[in-house]
Image (spheres, rainbow, N blue to C red):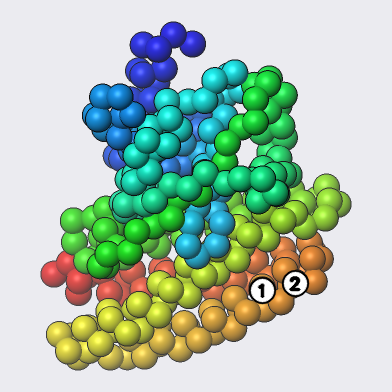
Amino acid sequence: MPNDTVNDFNHQVIEEFRANRGRVGGYFEGARLILLTTTGARTGAEHTTPVAYLPDGADRILVIASAGGAPWHPAWYHNLLAHPEVTVESGAFTYRARAEVLKGEERDQVFARAVETDAGWSEYQRKAGRVIPVVALYEIAGGPPNINAGSMGEAIKVVHDAFRRELALIREAMSAVTEGGSPLGAQLRVNCLTFCHGLHNHHTGEDLGLFPFLADRHPEAAPAVARLREEHERIAALVEALRTALDTADPATARAEVERLTRELEAHLTYEEEQLLPLLDA
């Protein structure tokens, strides 16, 4: 594909991604996607590229420098080798990150996990005739997260929708596993555990920050806040049940726990939005 065509395609995806806070259609529909902004190795100018990613626990995400199976590394990879500090846009959040290229056995294990979820990575590797690099992106700590929203209420909705999208992807992958009779893959387990960790952090932040704020500013919301706290405890129990199911590596049990968590969480998110967003955006 000519460079001008690639640039036009990327520009369209970037605009759609930002307008819809991470949700895009077309070629990337249903994919886990970030916008990765790197500093040019030669020019020093910033370049933003849509890149697929893999969840990988609490501290990092992973990106693969496949270039669609081309025999050369993509430009963004050369840029981060020269300037490892990058910017990541996830749709809900924007943050600075440190890039680290994985080596040896760790790289091979991660790439094998990627192939397990999508055989297209293996085809890219075959076509490329090179070892396709895998890069870990570690968020650089520095204050509260930068949520892509214009108000507190909008921020809550943006984060909730990000959880909804990720859970939908997990449910889709879990259904494919159970219907096909395949074992529970390593990357799918990582996706579930990463989701569980993110949800725990979100609810902890609400318990310690948002709910006390509302108690001080809006005492009339006390009954709703009390209910939300109780729901956090029930959801935490469901998260632990899912973690236990993942340890058993039984796809049917894990899928059942994902469905239980989905039902409880969706009801919780909807109630929270109904009760709190009008107060936060007043």
How far, Cα to Cα, is label 2 from label 1?
A: 6 Å
The residue wearing badge 1 is 243
Label ID, residue 31: none
Front residue of 157 and 60? 60
Front residue of 177 and 268? 177
Q: Is residue 40 left or right of residue 251?
A: left
Q: Is residue 89 left or right of residue 277?
A: right
Residue type at tag 2: Asp
Residue at position x 13%, y 69% from top? 282
Front residue of 212 and 66? 66
Neighbour class for label 2 at 10 Å: few (<14), some, many (≥20)?
A: few
Residue 269 image point, x, y percent:
42, 69
Residue at position x 52%, y 25% from top? 73
Q: Residue furthest right?
A: 181
Residue 204 image point, x, y percent:
40, 80
- Vertical placement of residue 261 versus 214, above or below: above
Q: Is residue 44 left or right of residue 252?
A: left
- Vertical placement of residue 197 versus 106, above or below: below
Residue 183 image point, x, y percent:
82, 55
- Quarter of the image for residue 111 reads top right
From this viewpoint, is residue 17 visible?
no
The residue wearing badge 2 is 247
Callouts 2 and 1 close, C-beta under 8 Å: yes
Local SS, label 2: helix
Residue at position x 42%, y 37% from top? 81
Residue type at tag 1: Arg
Residue 248 image point, x, y percent:
80, 71
